[in-house]
Image (spheres, grey):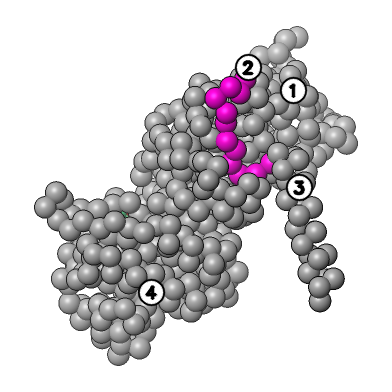
C-alpha cells in the first residue's frame, strides 16, 4: 500500500514539476521588474485548463430559458407568482435537445432557477417549484428531462442558477448562502454529469432592496468537489462574459487577460484546480489583452469569452415575438462574429408555453445549419499542392499544428486548378497558448501578391469573410506573434451570399 501511494505521489510530483518547468498553466504572476520580453514569454505560455479546453472546443452551445416567465409573458418575474400557472402540457425536452443538436449545438444550459426563484426541479429547499404546479400532478422534473435528453443525445448539459432570488424569504441574510449551497448540491448530485454552471450577475433589488453578499468562494468549492470538470461561467473563474448580448464579440479577442487579484497566497503554485475565484480587472473594454494591457498587469489568466444572445428579442418565449425570430442569415452573421472571433456561442432558444421549441425557431435553425454546412463542407486548401507539414493545417484536427518561428512565418499553398473563395478559417493550437497578434492572407495575381484579408488575434478560431478571390496561389503571413505561433488549422471556403 505504502509503496503504491509513494509511486502515486512521485508521479503527481513529476507532473507538477513538468508543468512548472514547461511554464504552462492557466495563470501566471508578473513581477514588477519583469522585462517586456519576459512578460510576453509569460503571456504566451498561459494555457487553458482541461475543463476550459473542453469547453472551448464545443464552439456552439445553447440556452433554454424556460420557467414561470414563460407563463406570465415576462422577462423578469417578481417571485410572487403562483406555481399553479406552470403547466407546459406538451413538454418534450427531447424535442428541445434534438432541435439544438441538429443545429450543431454541443451543450445546452437550462435555467433551473431564474431571478423569480421558481425551481424547475422538485427541491427540498423551497415550495416554490414544479412540485407545486399542476404539470404532471407535481411529479414532473424539467431538469431531469433535459439532463436525460442530453445524455441520450450525447451532448453536454449545464445549469443556470440565478444567485439573485426574489422569492426566497432569507435572501439578504447569511442563511441564503447555505440555502444556495443546498440547491447547488441537489442539482450537482442528482442529474449525472453537469458540464457548465452559469451564474448571472443581474440584480434588480435597487438601492432600497435586499442586500446579499454571495459566498462565491464556498459555492465554487462545492462545484469543484461535486463536478470537477464543469466550467463555472460569468460570475465564475473559468469563462468570461463577452460583454454584450448582441452575439458579436471583439475583433481582437485575447483569452489571456490581466487579472489583478491573482496573488501568491491565494493560489498553490502549479495547480490549475486552485484557481477558484473570479479574475478581476477590466473584462468589458474593447481591448482586454493587448501588449499595452498586459504590461501593467499583476497577473495573467486564461479567461475565455462566451458570447450569449437570444434567437428572439427576449430571453423567454413571448408569442408576439414569433415573427421576430432571428433569420438564418442573421444567425450566420452572429456565428462569424462569435465563434469566428475566438468565442463560444451560447444561443438562447426559449421553449414556448406548450413546452416545445416553436416552429418558427425550428425553421430558422434548420436553415441556418444548412447555410453553415454549405460553407464549411469543403476546405479548398485540402486539394492544394502542399508539403507533408502543411497538410497538418488541413487535417481537421486542432491537436496537430505547425510550430512556426518567432518571426517570418509564411505558409504558401498552390492549387492544382484556379479556385474561388471568400472565407478564411484559422485555428491556433491553444494547448500551447494564444500567440498570433497579426496576420494577412494574400493571393498571387498578375505577378504580385495582393491582400485578400487581414486580422489580429486568432486564438481557438478566427473566421474572416472578404470579397471573392480567384487565384492559383495563396499565402498566410503571420506578421506578429508572442513567441512562435502554433497554427493548427487553416481553411478557405466559399460562401454563397453574404
Ligand atoms: C441576464 C438576465 O437578467 C436575463 O434574464 C437572462 O437570463 C440573461 C442571460 O442574463 O443578466
The residue under the point 37% across, 78% down is: 121
Residue sitting at x 49%, y 24%: 296
Q: Which residue is drawn at 51% across and 32% down?
A: 298
The residue labelled by disc 3 is: 17
**Res 319 visible:** no
Residue 386, can we see it?
yes
Work out whether mark 1 precedes mark 4 in sequence or the reverse, and give the earlier one.
Answer: 4
Q: Which of marks 1 and 2 is nearer the N terminus?
A: 1
* Quarter of the image where one finds residue 443: top right
Q: Find numbered disc 2 in the image and state the secondary structure of the residue it sits on.
A: strand
Pointer 4 or 3: first along the chain: 3
Q: Where is residue 451 in the image (x, y as percent from the top left)?
A: 63, 17
Tell me the crowding category of disc 1: few under 14, some 14 to 19, or many 20 or more residues within 10 angstroms, Cα based: few
Q: Which mark is residue 451?
A: 2
* Mark 3 neighbour class, 10 Å CA radius: few under 14, some 14 to 19, many 20 or more: few
Q: Is mark 1 on a helix, strand or loop?
A: loop
* Contact (Cβ within 8 Å) of mark 1 with mark 3: no
Picture coordinates of residue 89 (x, y %)? 31, 81
Residue with the most extreme left position: 208
First-in-chain label (1 vs 3): 3
Q: Mark 4 points at which residue?
A: 182
In 3D space, how far apart are the residues under numbered discs 3 and 2 (Cα atoms)?
Answer: 45 Å
What's the mark number on residue 406? 1
377 sits to left or right of 275? right
Q: Distance between the residues labelled 1 and 4?
A: 51 Å
Q: Distance between the residues labelled 4 and 2?
A: 58 Å
Q: What element carries label 4?
A: helix
Q: What stretch is highlighted in magenta?
A: 24-35
Counting other residues with Cα less than 10 Å from the Cα at mark 4, is it few (<14), some (14-19), or many (20 or more)? some
Amino acid at each position: 500500500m505504502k509503496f503504491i501511494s509513494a509511486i502515486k505521489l512521485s508521479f503527481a510530483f513529476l507532473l507538477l514539476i513538468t508543468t512548472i518547468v514547461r511554464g504552462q498553466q492557466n495563470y501566471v504572476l508578473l513581477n514588477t521588474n519583469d522585462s517586456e520580453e519576459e512578460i510576453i514569454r509569460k503571456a504566451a505560455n498561459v494555457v487553458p485548463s482541461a475543463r476550459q479546453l473542453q469547453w472551448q472546443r464545443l464552439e456552439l452551445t445553447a440556452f433554454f430559458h424556460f420557467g414561470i416567465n414563460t407563463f406570465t409573458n415576462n422577462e423578469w418575474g417578481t417571485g410572487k407568482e403562483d406555481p399553479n400557472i406552470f403547466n407546459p402540457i406538451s413538454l418534450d425536452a427531447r424535442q428541445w435537445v434534438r432541435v439544438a443538436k441538429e443545429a450543431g449545438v454541443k451543450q445546452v444550459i437550462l435555467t433551473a432557477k431564474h431571478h423569480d426563484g421558481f425551481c424547475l426541479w422538485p427541491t427540498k429547499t423551497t415550495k416554490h417549484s414544479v412540485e407545486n404546479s399542476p404539470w404532471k400532478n407535481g411529479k414532473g422534473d424539467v431538469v431531469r428531462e433535459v439532463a436525460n435528453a442530453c445524455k441520450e443525445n450525447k451532448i453536454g448539459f449545464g445549469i443556470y442558477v440565478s444567485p439573485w432570488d426574489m422569492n426566497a424569504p432569507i435572501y439578504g441574510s447569511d442563511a441564503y448562502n447555505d440555502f444556495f449551497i443546498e440547491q447547488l448540491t441537489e442539482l450537482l448530485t442528482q442529474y449525472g454529469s453537469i458540464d457548465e454552471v452559469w451564474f448571472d450577475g443581474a440584480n434588480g433589488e435597487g438601492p432600497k432592496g435586499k442586500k446579499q453578499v454571495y459566498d462565491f468562494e464556498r459555492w465554487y468549492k462545492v462545484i469543484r468537489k461535486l463536478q470537477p470538470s464543469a466550467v463555472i461561467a460569468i460570475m465564475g473563474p473559468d469563462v468570461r462574459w463577452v460583454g454584450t448580448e448582441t452575439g458579436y464579440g471583439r475583433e481582437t479577442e485575447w483569452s489571456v487577460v490581466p487579472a489583478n487579484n491573482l496573488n501568491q497566497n491565494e493560489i498553490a503554485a502549479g495547480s490549475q484546480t486552485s484557481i477558484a475565484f473570479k479574475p478581476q480587472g477590466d473584462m468589458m473594454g474593447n481591448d482586454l489583452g493587448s501588449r499595452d494591457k498586459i504590461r501593467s498587469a499583476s497577473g495573467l489568466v486564461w479567461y475565455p469569452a462566451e458570447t450569449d444572445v437570444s434567437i428572439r428579442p427576449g430571453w423567454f418565449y413571448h408569442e408576439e415575438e414569433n415573427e421576430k425570430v432571428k433569420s438564418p442569415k442573421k444567425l450566420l452573421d452572429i456565428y462569424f462574429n462569435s465563434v469566428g472571433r475566438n468565442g463560444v456561442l451560447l444561443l438562447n432558444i426559449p421553449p414556448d408555453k406548450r413546452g416545445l421549441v416553436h416552429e418558427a425557431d425550428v425553421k430558422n435553425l434548420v436553415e441556418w445549419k444548412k447555410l453553415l454546412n454549405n460553407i464549411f463542407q469543403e476546405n479548398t486548401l485540402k486539394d492544394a499542392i502542399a508539403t507533408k507539414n502543411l497538410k497538418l493545417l488541413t487535417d481537421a484536427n486542432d491537436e496537430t499544428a505547425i510550430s512556426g518561428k518567432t518571426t517570418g512565418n509564411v505558409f504558401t499553398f498552390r492549387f492544382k486548378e484556379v479556385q474561388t473563395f471568400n472565407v478564411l478559417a484559422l485555428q491556433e493550437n491553444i494547448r500551447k497558448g494564444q500567440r498570433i497578434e497579426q496576420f494577412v492572407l494574400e493571393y498571387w495575381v498578375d505577378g504580385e501578391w495582393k491582400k485578400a484579408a487581414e486580422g489580429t488575434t486568432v486564438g481557438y478560431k478566427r473566421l474572416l469573410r472578404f470579397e471573392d478571390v480567384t487565384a492559383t496561389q495563396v499565402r498566410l503571413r503571420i506578421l506578429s506573434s508572442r513567441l512562435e505561433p502554433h497554427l493548427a488549422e487553416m481553411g478557405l471556403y466559399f460562401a454563397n451570399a453574404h
